[in-house]
């Protein structure tokens, strides 16, 4: 008996341990379950916090990567402005103004010699230009009257909005025009909410009733026929997520929609949706937001659209490709009319307005406005100048507004002159069609603003830009700098200085000889400097340049604006240096502006997307030469166009349009140049072949006709240089460079800086009867 008691205790202990073990099992399970739940809750909370952070960081501040928008100069209207009616109408059409009753913005009509115009207004950097209704009277190539219709009073000045000429897109190719909610027509908002999310103002981001209805409808149909996503969910999907149809994406969408509505107001969400929604594709460019869609489909601003057009935009939200009004007009029309029916059924649109809207055609433009700039050569120059101050990423994402100097009318005139003249030259010379190429730059004489750039005979081709990037030998186009350097030393050189045009040989540093030849292969003996420049004699010009000194010539070229490094070789004096048309524009701009160097500029100002001015590119003047010496060179270049290598201009330009200019021709006729200026515009033209083969054209037969057609079409103010103090005009005998009288055979008027004129009289003046003296005062008067 005594031995059994310990056994009972052992069994009891065993049973107790078993019971305790059995009790611990469920507790451990519950602890594991609770731990897993806690971890899940913490994980979910952390994930929700992460999504919330993503929403806040992406949705606040800069919400989109916006392309920089590049604008042309605004057209300013004021009495006395030079403007043709046809040019004015072309510019209105470029701005997508439509013929109408001129009551709504963006419309105009012609009536009785007057143009009635309703402008759109624009937020310029120096202050907003309000929308206005105007009467513009144009007669004789200028604005003769400008009247404000609302007040009936004359208007001193009005500015049209600048034409959008380019966008600098983000790498992903998204494009949009941001609109504020208060700028969006109520009809558009009503239609969007009616069609896409009727309970938008009641739900908190997810509409569970709509989801249930959609699920039931889809179950009955056996396929997806209805969606239950709210506008907020659609915004989340487009803005934050991918288009993948996965359960994870749908869960993320719902959570983020709830978070978005918790943090932001309904108006903020709606405004974001209006700017984010995808509404079409244009090549590599995707069309986002109703602001851009309005321009893409109708070429009008959103606030200029009618009810039917707004309904069509809302109709495409469900499927921009499926309901594309250009490719699938029947589908688009049916869907648009359904939107109108729903608006009428919800009492958002009266029966009469709905019926009228349904009766209208789709009204989209036949061709979408291209997202590619129509002026690629000019945009090249703009981007080149922007890189000095802005990173490429800034241009692609910050929505900068860039206001340029481009004049659309002059740009189109330059394109027409290049394409038309090259074709005619090829036909007349028997050259292969399309074998010639060209580069052209036009600038304003008084400001240095670049008004037009043509880099290819096909101006829409965004390839090699011959106006900005092509470096070609310039030939005689450089000679005015040689003469300017000499005439800046009036004690030694004048236009009457006699130069030797006989044979010349120069021993170079490498031991070889350099022997320049004249284009006509002739020698002309002793000639005045004026005649050597007018007839572009190479030998006498080389002698003059060597006498002045190569380093002085190079210094003068640099001060005129040519920044490229130049080597002091004698051949430089005859233009054996490769420069671009833009660089030659810089040099001739300094001559046209009386000796003040003005860098050619293509940008006026840059604003941020809020309209604040970031930078203004103003006039930058630096004196590059003595104005008196420049005046003498301009007088000589005018003579070039009257009786020198550019004399054919006299049959191509109006008689009342005096100009100054210079031809340039390189070896074997591979390059043809002409640079010249009137009182308002300067233009430089290069013509040649891309393969550098001879083309049989000189500056006067290749480039000059293009220049003449261009300048004859745009210039309205002939050459009118201001004579500096200390300059006098005298008659000179070209046979000896001495003073002459009116009656000396072949005598020429020449300007001189005081104290530099020749003192002796030419023998031709002896015994000239007063009755036979000839007068050249008209020429001298031009420059006085």
Image (cartoon, helix red, strand yellow):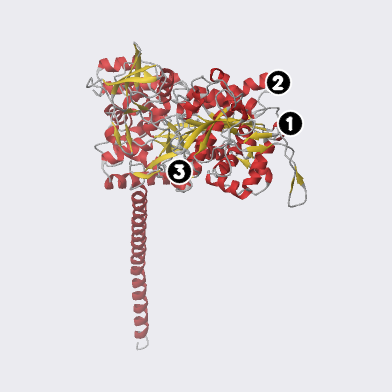
Q: In the figure, is residue 471 to the left or right of 343?
A: right
Question: Percent position (x, y) of residue 157?
Answer: 31, 28
Query: Circle 3 is placed at which residue position?
Result: 396
Instruction: Determine contact: label 3, label 2, CB under 8 Å.
Output: no
Label 2 to label 1, Cα distance in Å? 29 Å
Q: At 48% from the left edge and 24% from the top edge, which residue is drawn?
A: 714
Query: Which label sits in the foreground, 2 or 1?
Result: 1
Q: Visible in this render: residue 416?
A: no
Instruction: State the quadrant of the C terminus.
Output: top left
Q: Picture coordinates of residue 279 (x, y %)?
A: 42, 31
Judged by depth in the image, the label closer to the viewer, 3 or 2, is 2
Q: Counting residues from the N terminus, which is met first, the one under dot 3 or under dot 2?
A: 3
Real-space CA distance between mark 3 and mark 1, rounded to the nearest whole angstrom: 58 Å
Q: Find disc 1 in the rendering and name its residue.
A: 522
> In the figure, residue 299 lies in which quadrant?
top left
Q: Is mark 2 on a helix, strand or loop?
A: loop
The picture places residue 219, in percent across and down from the top left corner, at 39, 32
* Residue at x 70%, y 28% (from the top left corner): 695
Position of 98 relative to 493 (above/below): above
Helix, strand or loop at label 1? It is loop
Image quarter (top left, top right, bottom left or bottom right) of the N terminus = bottom left
Q: Which of marks 3 and 1 is in front?
A: 1
Residue at the disc numbered 2: 430
Q: Which of 309 and 628 is in front in this view?
A: 628
């Amino acid at each position: 008996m005594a031995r059994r008691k310990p056994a009972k205790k052992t069994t009891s202990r065993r049973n107790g341990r078993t019971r305790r073990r059995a009790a611990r099992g469920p507790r451990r399970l519950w602890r594991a379950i609770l731990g897993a739940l806690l971890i899940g809750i913490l994980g979910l909370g952390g994930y929700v916090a992460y999504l919330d952070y993503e929403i806040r960081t992406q949705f606040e501040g800069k919400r989109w990567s916006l392309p920089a928008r590049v604008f042309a100069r605004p057209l300013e209207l004021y009495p006395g402005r030079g403007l043709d009616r046809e040019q004015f109408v072309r510019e209105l059409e470029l701005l997508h103004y439509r013929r109408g009753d001129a009551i709504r913005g963006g419309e105009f009509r012609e009536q009785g010699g007057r143009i009635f115009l309703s402008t759109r207004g624009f937020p310029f950097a120096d202050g907003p230009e309000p929308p206005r209704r105007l009467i513009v009277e144009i007669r004789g190539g200028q604005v003769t009257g400008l009247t404000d219709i609302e007040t009936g009073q004359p208007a001193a000045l009005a500015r049209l909005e600048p034409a959008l000429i380019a966008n600098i897109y983000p790498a992903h190719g998204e494009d949009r025009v941001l609109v504020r909610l208060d700028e969006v027509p109520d009809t558009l908002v009503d239609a969007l909410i009616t069609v896409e999310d009727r309970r938008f103002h009641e739900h908190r981001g997810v509409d569970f009733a709509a989801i249930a209805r959609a699920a039931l409808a889809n179950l009955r149909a056996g396929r997806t026929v209805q969606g239950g996503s709210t506008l907020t969910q659609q915004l989340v999907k487009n803005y934050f997520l991918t288009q993948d149809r996965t359960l994870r994406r749908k869960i993320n969408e719902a959570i983020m929609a709830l978070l978005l509505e918790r943090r932001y107001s309904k108006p903020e969400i709606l405004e974001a949706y209006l700017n984010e929604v995808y509404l079409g594709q244009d090549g590599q460019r995707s069309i986002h937001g109703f602001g851009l869609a309005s321009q893409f489909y109708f070429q009008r601003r959103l606030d200029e659209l009618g009810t039917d057009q707004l309904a069509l935009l809302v109709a495409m939200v469900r499927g921009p490709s499926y309901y594309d009004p250009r490719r699938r007009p029947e589908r688009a029309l049916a869907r648009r009319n359904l939107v109108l029916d729903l608006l009428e059924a919800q009492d958002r649109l009266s029966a009469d307005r709905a019926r009228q809207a349904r009766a209208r055609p789709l009204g989209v433009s036949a061709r979408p406005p291209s997202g590619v700039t129509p002026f690629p050569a000019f945009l090249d120059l703009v981007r080149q100048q922007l890189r000095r101050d802005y990173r490429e990423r800034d241009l692609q994402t910050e929505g900068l507004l860039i206001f340029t100097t481009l004049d659309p009318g002059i740009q189109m005139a330059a394109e027409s002159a290049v394409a038309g003249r090259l074709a005619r030259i090829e036909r007349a010379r028997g050259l292969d069609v399309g074998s010639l190429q060209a580069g052209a730059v036009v600038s304003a004489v008084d400001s240095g603003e670049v008004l037009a750039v043509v880099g290819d005979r096909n101006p829409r081709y965004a390839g090699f830009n011959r106006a900005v990037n092509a470096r070609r030998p310039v030939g005689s186009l450089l000679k005015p700098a040689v003469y300017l350097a000499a005439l800046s030393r009036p004690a030694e050189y004048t236009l009457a200085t006699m130069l030797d045009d006989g044979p010349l040989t120069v021993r170079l540093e490498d031991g070889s000889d350099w022997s320049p030849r004249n284009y006509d292969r002739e020698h002309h003996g002793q000639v005045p400097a004026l005649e050597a420049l007018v007839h572009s004699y190479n030998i006498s010009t080389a002698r003059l340049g060597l006498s002045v000194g190569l380093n002085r010539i190079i210094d003068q070229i640099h001060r005129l604006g040519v920044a490229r490094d130049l080597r002091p070789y004698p051949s430089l004096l005859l233009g054996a240096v490769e420069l671009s048309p833009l660089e030659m524009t810089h040099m001739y701009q300094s001559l046209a502006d009386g000796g003040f160097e003005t860098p050619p500029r293509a940008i006026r100002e840059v604003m941020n997307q809020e309209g604040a001015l970031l930078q203004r590119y103003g006039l930058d003047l630096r004196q590059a030469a003595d104005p008196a010496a420049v005046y003498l060179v301009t007088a000589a270049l005018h003579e070039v166009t009257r009786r020198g290598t550019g004399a054919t201009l006299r049959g191509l330009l109006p008689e009342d349009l005096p100009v100054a200019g210079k031809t340039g021709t390189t070896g074997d006729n591979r390059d043809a140049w002409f640079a010249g200026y009137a009182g308002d515009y300067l233009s430089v033209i290069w013509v040649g072949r891309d393969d550098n083969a001879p083309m049989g054209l000189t500056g006067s037969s290749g480039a000059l006709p293009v220049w003449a057609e261009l300048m004859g079409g745009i210039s309205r103010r002939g050459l009118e240089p201001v004579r500096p103090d200390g300059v006098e005009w005298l008659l000179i005998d070209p046979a000896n460079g001495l003073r002459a009288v009116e009656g000396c055979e072949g005598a020429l008027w020449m300007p001189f800086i005081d104290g530099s004129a020749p003192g002796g009289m030419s023998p031709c003046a002896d015994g000239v009867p007063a009755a036979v003296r000839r007068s050249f005062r008209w020429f001298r008067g031009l420059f006085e």
